[in-house]
């Protein structure tokens, strides 16, 4: 069973860039169709950020597209998320997850809380 | 793209059945057979319970079932158990390689 683990700074300064990694273990990152990032502000609902195929093809949420970059490093079996020009509204728990948009996400990582400070 | 609409809360007694609705539009829920449901316990990651409107991943009890009519999807939990108390989120493919989530429903087992 594939397992996912997010990592990165828990605190990012406002107007800076949020950078997170998601390590894939128990299987190859090339074995799943797509990999997504999803976030959840404290006490609020889920928001899909974007997805990447192991070949490098990406799709992004239109509301975040101008600030988001998702990439994959097959040699290290991990994917990455960069979110530019962050504000307090970007404070959230960030999850990585496996699966296609049409078939649901399974499994998910445990999530990492990122706080944007002024 | 607007979020899907879910009731903020739902409740039921142990053994009873409860249904949670998820209302979208003809551009998402109504257009595609790609509605998923997630269970999230406090402090934990979401867990896929239903995909493709009514399909259950391996290991999910058959007490959980999904359906769709028009622009509204529903998750029904039968034979409520204490551990079913959690937040539930729906999601739907929205076309153009985009996905939308519902706002979530807090299920309380009385």
Image: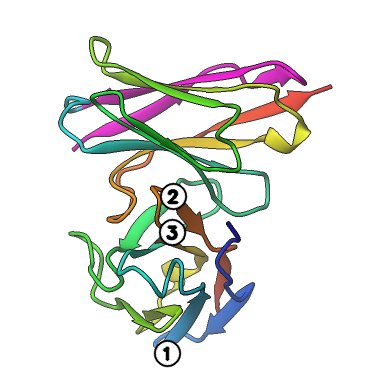
Above/below status of A117 relative to B76: above
Q: Check the residue under mark 1 and report the chain it is in.
A: B
Q: Which residues are magenta?
A: A1-25
Depth check: A81 or B18 in front? A81
Examine the structure image and report whether residue B57 is included in the region drawn in magenta: no
Number of the label disc, if any, that sits on residue B16: 1
Res B69 quadrant in image:
bottom left
Please tell me how crowded label 1 is: few (under 14), some (14-19), or many (20+) other residues with Cα within 10 Å: few
Res A96 quadrant in image:
top left
Instruction: Label 1, secondary structure: give it.
Output: loop
Spatial distance from mark 2 to mark 1, Cα to Cα? 35 Å
Predominant secondary structure, magenta span:
strand
Q: Earlier in the sequence, mark 3 or mark 1?
A: 1
Q: Earlier in the sequence, mark 2 or mark 1?
A: 1
C-beta proximity under 8 Å, tags 3 and 2: yes
* In this rendering, the label closer to the viewer, 3 or 1: 3
Q: Residue at x 24, y 26 (%)?
A: A54
Instruction: Label 2, secondary structure: give it.
Output: loop
According to the picture, the residue beneath numbered tag 3 turns out to be B94
Q: Where does the image place residue B63, in percent across and percent down from the top left?
A: 29, 78
- Position of A89 compared to B87: left or right? right
In what quadrant of the picture does the N terminus of chain B appear?
A: bottom right
């Amino acid at each position: 069973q594939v397992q996912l683990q997010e990592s990165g700074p828990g605190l990012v300064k406002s107007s800076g860039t949020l950078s997170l990694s998601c390590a894939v273990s128990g299987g190859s990152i090339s074995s799943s169709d797509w990999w997504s990032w999803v976030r959840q502000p404290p006490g609020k609902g889920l928001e899909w950020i974007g997805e990447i195929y192991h070949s490098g093809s990406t799709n992004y949420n239109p509301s975040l597209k101008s600030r988001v970059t998702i990439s994959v490093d097959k040699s290290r079996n991990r994917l990455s998320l960069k979110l530019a020009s962050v504000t307090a509204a970007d404070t959230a728990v960030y999850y990585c997850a496996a699966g296609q948009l049409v078939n649901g996400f399974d499994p998910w990582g445990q999530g990492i809380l990122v706080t944007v400070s002024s | 793209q607007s979020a899907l609409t879910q009731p903020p809360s739902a409740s039921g007694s142990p053994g009873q059945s409860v249904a949670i609705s998820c209302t979208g539009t003809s551009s998402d829920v109504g257009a595609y057979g790609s509605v998923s449901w997630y269970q999230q316990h406090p402090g934990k990651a979401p867990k896929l319970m239903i995909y493709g409107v009514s399909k259950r991943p391996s290991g999910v009890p058959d007490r959980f079932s999904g359906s769709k009519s028009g622009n509204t999807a529903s998750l029904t939990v039968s034979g409520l158990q204490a551990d079913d108390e959690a937040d539930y989120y729906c999601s739907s493919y929205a076309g153009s390689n985009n996905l939308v989530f519902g706002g979530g429903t807090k299920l309380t087992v009385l």
